[in-house]
Amino acid sequence: MNGVDHVEPHTAIPALVRKLSSLPDQHAQHSTLPAYVAAVRTAVDSMRPDLETVTGELRGGTDYANLLPGVLSTRVYLKQQNARVQTLLESYAEPLSAVRVARRSALSAGACGTPGRRCCGTIRMTASAAAASPGARRERDPVRPRPAGR
């Protein structure tokens, strides 16, 4: 198979399939797992080969499959990184996005109440938005413009 749990798909496979198929008496095909299983079943039904019967769980990993016995979890480091990134998004990006939407809405209506017109001030950041955005500068209050020199 080209690309599995532990290995990315190899990008050279399509070119290799074309090269193999160009050789005399050769046919290579890049397909899907269900199509492969269907082709094997068709071949077995038409040729009727003498096949070995295998019983049991096939957990050995050496003869039939590349198994990882005893593995209970996968890529814990990725799960930890994902949890950190989700926390950052919830703590910073989402609150700042809400402030942006509220600000855009207030500005499109005009801080002075006149639609589509900006006036001397902009909306004030809420306490939760300021807390979610450390170091953010508070904007001017639309009701009380900032005194000169500040």
Image (cartoon, helix red, strand yellow):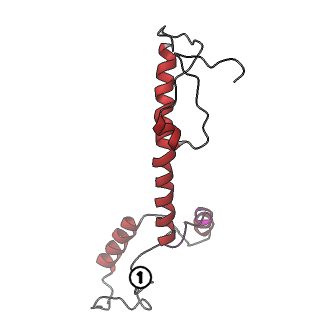
- How far from the left and from the top, in percent, is residue 21? 58, 67
Q: Which residues are magenta?
A: 4-14
123 and 69: which one is in front? 123
| Residue that numbered label 1 is attached to | 71
**Number of marks in the rendered image:** 1
- How far from the left and from the top, in percent, is residue 84? 50, 59
Query: With respect to residue 74, does 9 lie above or below?
Result: above
Q: Quadrant of residue 146?
A: top right
Q: Main secondary structure of the magenta part?
A: loop
Q: Is residue 2 left or right of residue 59?
A: right
Q: Is residue 15 left or right of residue 111?
A: right
Residue at (27, 91) in percent of width and height: 56
Which element is circle 1 on? loop
Residue at (53, 69) in percent of width and height: 27
39 and 141: which one is in front? 141
Residue at (46, 65) in percent of width and height: 79
Q: Is residue 108 left or right of residue 51?
A: right
Q: Quadrant of residue 35?
A: bottom left
Specify the quadrant that holds the C terminus. Answer: top right
Q: Can residue 105 be seen?
A: yes
Q: Which amino acid type corresponds to the residue marked 1 in the rendered image?
A: Val
Residue 5 in magenta? yes
Dot 1: few (<14), some (14–19), or many (≥20) neighbours within 10 Å?
Answer: few
